[in-house]
Amino acid sequence: MTDQQRQQKTEACEVEETRAGHRVTSPSGNTYEVRSHTKLDELGSMYFTRSCSCPARGTCVHMAAVDLYQRQQAAAAGDYDGLNVLDRFEI
Ligand SMILES: [Zn+2]
């Protein structure tokens, strides 16, 4: 998959907020649950990871779609703290 194809797939996903995290509907109609996790590294600094219920390894387009969605929400709200937090995600 090229970067451009990946970008198109990411943008074609629909993201919905749920109590547990986010539900992502892919263009093919499958839905997956994406969860965010807060973690501490060995120095006690907070960082964040995401997990997805799809079978793909590594960062799938669903996690990328949630990242894009959260950035758009934070940018729309002028939430710079929120954007900072997103930069601390290890995906
Ligand atoms: Zn996925």
Image (spheres, rainbow, N blue to C red):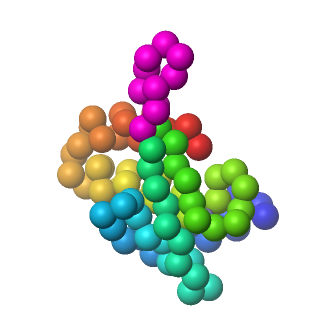
Between 2 and 19, the one lying in front of the other is 19
Magenta-drawn segment: 38-47
Whether the magenta-drawn stretch holds residue 43 is answered as yes
Q: What is the quadrant of residue 54 in the picture? A: bottom right
Say above or below: 33 vs 51. Answer: below
Which quarter shows the N terminus? bottom right
Residue found at x 70% / y 66%: 55
Question: Residue 8, image x and y in percent?
Answer: 61, 69
Question: Magenta includes 35?
Answer: no
Q: Quarter of the picture for ligand 1?
A: bottom right
Q: Outermost residue toward the top?
A: 43
Q: Is residue 8 visible?
A: no
The furthest residue to the right: 1
Taking the view exactly as shown, the residue that stands out farthest to the left is 77
Mark count: 0
Where, quadrant-wise, is the C terminus in this rendering? top right
Q: Residue 15 in the image: state x and y as whole percent.
A: 42, 70
Q: x and y percent of residue 24 in the render? A: 48, 71
